[in-house]
Image: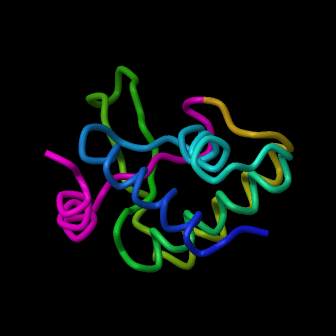
C-alpha cells in the first residue's frame, strides 16, 4: 500500500522531470522506488500503475512511443488512445513483461499543456 502523499510526491517528481524530457516507463518505476519507497517489484508495479492512472486520467500526460528509425524522424509519437485505453494497454503490457521495464520498453509519457502548466508551478527556480 502507499499513501496519497507518496503518490503525489511521485507524480510531482515526474511532472518536473517531464519539463525537460519525455518520461519512459523505466523512469516511472524508478520514481516509485526512490520517491515512493517501494522495493518489492509487485509493489513498485502497483504504485507505478497508480501514478500512470492519475497522470493520464487528469490529462497531465499522454502515452506513446519513442521511435528512432529510418522511416521517420526520432521523437515521441502519441498512441492516440483515450486515457482509459492507455491505462489498460500499459497495465497489460507491463504485466506481460513480467519484470520492471527497461528504457524503451512499454511506453513513454509526454506532458500535455496542462501537465506543463502544473509542473512549472512545482518547479523550484
| Magenta-drawn stretch contains 104 | yes
Q: Position of residue 71 (x, y in %)?
A: 34, 27
**Which residue is nearer to you in this view: 19 or 77?**
19
Q: Residue at x 47, y 46 (%)?
A: 108
The quadrant of the picture occupied by the N terminus is bottom right
Q: Quadrant of residue 79?
A: bottom left
Give the side of residue 100 with respect to residue 118, left or right: right
Q: How many marks?
A: 0
Taking the spot 24% from the left edge, 67% from the top edge, the residue there is: 118
Which percent across, then down, holds residue 115?
28, 65
Horizontal side of 23 relative to 19 (left or right) equals: right
First to last magenta residue range: 103-125
Residue 68 figure quarter: top left
The one nearer the camera, 59 or 30, is 30
Question: 53 or 96, which is in the foreground?
Answer: 53
Residue found at the far left of this picture: 125
Quadrant position of the C terminus in the picture: top left
Q: Position of residue 29 (x, y in %)?
A: 64, 45
- Residue at the spot 31% in from the left edge and 29% down from the top edge: 74
Query: Which residue of the protein is positioned furthest toward the top in this rendering?
Result: 70
Residue 65 lies, with reference to residue 120, above or below; the image says: above
Task: Answer with the quarter of the image where residue 48 lies.
Answer: bottom right
Residue 124 percent coordinates (x, y): 20, 49
Question: Is 107 contained in the magenta span?
Answer: yes
Q: Is 54 situated above or below 96?
A: below
| Figure colour scheme | rainbow
Amino acid at each position: 500500500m502507499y499513501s496519497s502523499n507518496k503518490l503525489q510526491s511521485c507524480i510531482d517528481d515526474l511532472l518536473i522531470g517531464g519539463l525537460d524530457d519525455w518520461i519512459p516507463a523505466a523512469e516511472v518505476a524508478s520514481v516509485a522506488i526512490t520517491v515512493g519507497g517501494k522495493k518489492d517489484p509487485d509493489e513498485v508495479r502497483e504504485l507505478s500503475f497508480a501514478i500512470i492512472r492519475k497522470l493520464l486520467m487528469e490529462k497531465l500526460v499522454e502515452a506513446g512511443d519513442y521511435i528512432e528509425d529510418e522511416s521517420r524522424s526520432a521523437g515521441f509519437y502519441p498512441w492516440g488512445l483515450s486515457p482509459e485505453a492507455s491505462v489498460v494497454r500499459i497495465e497489460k503490457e507491463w504485466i506481460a513483461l513480467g519484470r520492471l521495464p527497461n528504457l524503451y520498453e512499454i511506453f513513454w509519457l509526454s506532458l500535455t499543456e496542462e501537465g506543463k502548466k502544473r509542473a512549472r508551478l512545482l518547479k523550484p527556480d
